[in-house]
Image (tube, grey):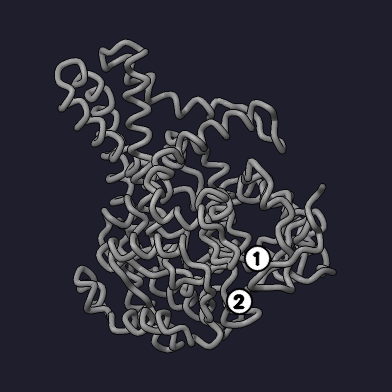
Amino acid sequence: MGPDADRRQTSFPKLKYPLHRDEDPRTAQQWMKSKKLQDGAEDLWRIHDELYDLSEFISKHPGGSQWISLTKGTDITEQFETHHLKGIAETLLPKYFIRKATAPRNSPFTFNEDGFYRTLKSKVMERLEEIPKDARSKSDNLTDLLLAILIVLSPMCCWAWSYNWMLGASLTLLNGFVLSAVATCSHNYLHRADSWRMYLMNLTGMTHEDWRISHSMSHHMHTNTIQDIELSMFEPILLFLPYRDKPIVAQMGAFYWPIIFMFVFLAVLIKEVVTAAINFEGKTLSWKNLIPFMLPTWMWIAGGLPLLWTIPVWIASFMVASFFFTLFGLTAGHHAHVNFFDGDIPRQEYLDWGMHQMDTIVERIDYAGNHFKSITRFGDHALHHLFPTLDHAELKYLYPILLEHCEKFDMPFRTTTFYGALVSHAKQLIRKRPNNFATQNNKELNTSYEKGTVFSSSWFGILDCTLNKK
């Protein structure tokens, strides 16, 4: 039986349910296929209610051709609004206009000129001129340093196993942690123009092409909605959506999640290789599929262990990296039990995209403004989601603007700690009762909001230099 074309979303019942969301193997290609069938883009590029032919612009796009070529036949409104901060793209767009769209947008998000996001974006565009010009080089240098450490440490942990198992085990754990940090640093570059550092993500078994779809285009633009493929990829093992019929086995995920986290990279690697090998939905094998195997090959060549012993050491490092990468990713802010998920009652039937982002994030206050934690553990997550093309080293300079803007719009900036986020993500795996963002009459939700509003710029001590500029 094929997918139900008339099925609707839970929180936004006027909008269509993604056709292939619940079909295995739940790939980025399936998500794009659904978008092309449901977005009303008529094999063009849709922005708001207008259709454009960007074919001639593919090779000219400053961010790289992939962003344009992948999205043909889809609605790219959210990407267009959030990925362009200099005002140049808006001036070029009329040249490629074809006609008005005939179908309504299959999205609940708005970008009104006087709304939360557009007005915040204009303030951020002004502040960008004041950010130190060398800020991005800090991220480049840190990423390169961690990669160098990984290159040295990987064969060392193999060498250590041949001398002392305690030393070998310790270095293997450290190696996995560094690999997770390198992969998370790579995430900083996936949202921007093409860079060699984006390929570091492929060391984990994931591909940067698929991650640009599943993470940047799906998760970032449609956070915690039914269009967020990063939620569906964990189903039915981990079910974050707060549906009343959530089975007890899924709720038990609040206790067995550490085991799942360790196997994420292995599962993704197998899925990537198999789907590419069988040309699933157009995927093909390429040299990029070899990148995950470069690390174990190097460990074997330089580590001194036989291949049959090197492979288990690499797998152990791989599983450690998978655990920490997923742990930091799923406690970054979105998976708290007080956040909005599909199944909850939204603020409005159609709402400002920026407000929706704030309803899906509880910031980890102990990571905020710290560059190392930000780039290696998905920190400063609210600002990163609002302005994904900015470097993580630039985000801390925008906190005064964001906090002032939230106060102006009576939008709570909710905060927690890493350990608080860890507990809250487990509670979300259990949660079945919907949160009500329309009236905010949920007692626990209101309590969390009230805690969030007490934080101000003074909590971000490292931002003193920024505040003094004002």
Q: Residue at x 58, y 66 (%)?
A: 243
Q: Residue at x 69, y 34 (%)?
A: 280
Q: Position of residue 43 (x, y in %)?
A: 80, 53
The secondary element bearing badge 2 is classed as loop
**Any part of residue 196 in sight:** no
Q: Amino acid at mark 1?
A: Thr
**Any part of residue 342 in sight:** yes
- Looking at the image, which residue sits at the far top? 306
Work out whether 59 lies above or below 434. Answer: above
Residue 118, by quadrant, is: bottom right
Q: Residue at x 82, y 58 (%)?
A: 42
Q: 26 or 33: nearer the eye?
A: 26
Q: Position of residue 295 (x, y in %)?
A: 37, 26
The secondary element bearing badge 1 is classed as helix
Marks 1 and 2, the one that precedes in the sequence:
1
Q: Which residue does the numbered mark 2 point to in the structure image? A: 111
Q: Which residue does the numbered mark 1 point to in the structure image? A: 77
Q: Give the position of the C terminus as an image quadrant.
A: bottom left
Q: Amino acid at mark 2?
A: Phe
Work out whether 322 lies above or below 253. Answer: above
Q: 229 or 131: nearer the eye?
A: 229
Q: Which mark is residue 149?
A: none
Q: Are marks 1 and 2 in contact (CB under 8 Å)?
A: yes
